[in-house]
Image: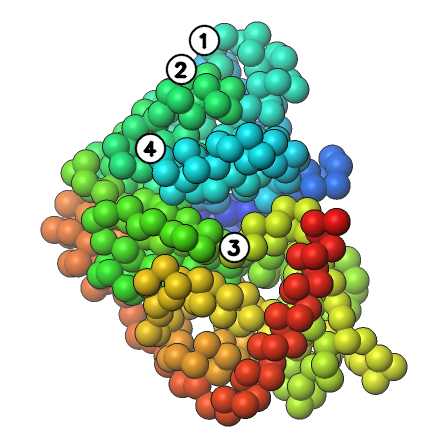
């Protein structure tokens, strides 16, 4: 490849537990990748925080490594950014330094605030404007809490900048550009999904200073420029991680569905050019915005997926590595009646029970770690089935499912997903679809592709898992799961 070519795409994929930079060719090949782990802190039960300065330092390091790998900034046509959504950062416009810990999407400190707003009758207004529900998951209540509990933020006045992680990284990369894309903005519970603008009424409801929020922009285009790596590189694509994964999975037509099993599990179905309305507590969200025009998706969010396996490994010491779960699951014919409801951070869709707590039921002296590990993996399919049922009730059923994320390298889990859902499950051979989607957006923004349809040429081969479980066994398993979940939900409401 000629050294003066300008046809590489650099992606910054800033997740919950790591920040990664990846270098892509326009045919979809990942040329290089580098990652650094991120620390999370838990000041109290239910609280989860990041150090925004650490996020920036490690992002800078991995990005510089990819620029060097490319042979210099001149080789890169554009940067794509994708990020953990809903996590909120507070910083000083004058110094560019964080003013407080970043409050992570998993954080539940505002459960009481959201419950109070719900009891006062505000949820219908919030859902009508934003497509979201009143839950600590979303950014708005986090910001309001911080403005009340951390007075120095209000004291900062016009110097205060607030944004999701994409905003923070773009500010640092560009030296002061304060923007966010429409997908991340749609997850704050402050943007009207019908207009694509911040809503004054919502800002007032949650106690959010609108002046501190970023400008909302498209997901692709010449969105900014960084000179931090020895030359000018345009920032050409931005999307929240789940929307980026849907793009990377080529879910560009209504009805196409992807499920990402990472720290949590997030399922999006393309819903067309009109925001979908859910009667079953699903979320209406922006899939992407190009040229000021928005496409929408219906989304179901599960808070605990891969983090459950991490908990089994790091906290309980039940396994040595995540990969062990596949062999353990295969080593027993079933779970022996064990069900694991992974409400370690409350229950997300379709339950939305922030006070729920995890449970392991059906234990006996015959229960071994293989049964618990298998129950943990089965919980992924059960949670997906709950969402499939809710999506179908909203008129948007899944006829197949495209899966990705770190967990789906597990063949047993992928097959169990197909068996329990009763549909074909498709897994791309290149599993980093979140980064791939950001690369596709950046490729469009940089003019390497004429549009997203053309950019899907970057997507590679896929494997298909076909259901093989008998209907009687499938239904018996689902009955047991429903009983286990009902107990957890009932306990959370006492």
Dot 3 lies on which element? loop
Instruction: Quickly name the residue at label 4.
Output: 192
Whether tag 3 and tag 2 are in contact, CB under 8 A, the answer is no
Residue mark closest to the camera, 4 vs 2: 4
How many angstroms separate mark 4 from mark 3 (CA)? 21 Å
- 435, 364: nearer the viewer: 364
- Identified at 46% across, 51% down, the residue is 281
In which quadrant will I find the N terminus?
Answer: bottom left
Q: Answer with mark 4 or mark 3, whichever residue precedes in sequence.
A: 4
How many angstroms separate mark 3 from mark 1 (CA)? 37 Å
Q: Answer with mark 1 or mark 2, whichever residue precedes in sequence.
A: 1
How many angstroms separate mark 1 from mark 2 (CA)? 8 Å
| Residue 248 position (above or below residue 360) | above
Disc assigned to residue 158 = 1
| Residue 373 position (above or below residue 220) | below
Residue mark closest to the camera, 1 vs 2: 2
- Identified at 30% across, 28% down, the residue is 197
Whether tag 4 and tag 2 are in contact, CB under 8 A, the answer is no
Judged left or right of residue 98, residue 70 is: left
Residue mark closest to the camera, 3 vs 1: 3
């Amino acid at each position: 490849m000629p050294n003066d070519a300008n046809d590489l795409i650099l992606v910054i994929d800033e997740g919950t537990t790591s920040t990664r930079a990846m270098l892509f060719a326009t045919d979809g090949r990942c040329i290089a990748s580098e990652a650094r782990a991120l620390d999370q802190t838990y000041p109290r039960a239910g609280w989860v925080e990041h150090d925004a300065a650490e996020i920036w330092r490690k992002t800078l390091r991995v990005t510089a490594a990819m620029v060097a790998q490319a042979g210099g900034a001149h080789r890169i046509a554009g940067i794509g950014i994708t990020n953990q959504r809903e996590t909120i950062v507070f910083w000083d416009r004058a110094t560019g330094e964080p003013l407080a810990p970043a409050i992570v999407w998993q954080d539940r400190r505002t459960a009481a605030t959201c419950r109070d707003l719900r009891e006062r009758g505000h949820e219908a207004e919030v859902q009508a404007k934003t497509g979201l529900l009143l839950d600590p998951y979303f950014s708005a209540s986090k910001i309001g809490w911080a403005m009340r509990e951390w007075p120095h933020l209000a004291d900062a006045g016009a110097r205060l900048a607030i944004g999701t992680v994409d905003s923070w990284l773009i500010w640092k990369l560009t030296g002061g550009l304060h923007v966010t894309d429409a997908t991340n903005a749609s997850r704050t519970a402050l943007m009207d999904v019908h207009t694509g603008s911040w809503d004054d009424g919502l800002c007032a409801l949650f106690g959010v200073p609108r002046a501190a929020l970023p400008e909302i922009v498209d997901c692709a285009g010449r969105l900014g420029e960084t000179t931090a790596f020895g030359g000018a590189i345009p920032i050409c694509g931005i999307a929240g991680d789940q929307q980026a994964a849907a793009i990377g999975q080529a879910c560009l037509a209504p009805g196409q569905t992807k499920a990402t099993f990472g720290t949590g599990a997030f399922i999006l179905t393309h819903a067309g050019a009109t925001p979908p309305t859910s009667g079953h507590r699903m979320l209406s969200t922006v899939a992407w915005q190009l040229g000021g025009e928005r496409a929408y998706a219906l989304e179901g969010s599960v808070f605990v997926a891969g983090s459950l396996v991490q908990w089994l490994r790091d906290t309980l010491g039940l396994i040595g590595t995540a990969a062990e779960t596949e062999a353990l699951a295969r080593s027993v014919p079933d779970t022996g009646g064990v069900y694991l409801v992974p409400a370690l951070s409350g229950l997300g869709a379709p339950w939305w029970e922030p006070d729920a707590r995890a449970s392991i039921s059906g234990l006996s002296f015959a229960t071994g770690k293989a049964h618990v590990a298998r129950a943990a993996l089965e919980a992924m399919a059960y949670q997906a089935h709950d969402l499939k049922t809710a999506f179908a009730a909203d008129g948007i059923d899944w006829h197949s499912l495209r899966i990705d994320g770190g967990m789906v390298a597990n063949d047993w889990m992928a097959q169990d997903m197909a068996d329990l859902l009763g549909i074909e499950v498709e897994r791309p051979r290149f599993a980093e679809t979140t980064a791939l989607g950001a690369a596709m957006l950046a490729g469009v923004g940089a003019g390497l592709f004429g549009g997203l349809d053309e950019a899907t040429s970057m997507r590679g081969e896929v494997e298909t898992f076909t259901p093989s479980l008998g209907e009687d066994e499938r239904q018996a398993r689902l009955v047991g799961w429903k009983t286990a979940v009902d107990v957890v939900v009932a306990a959370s409401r006492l």
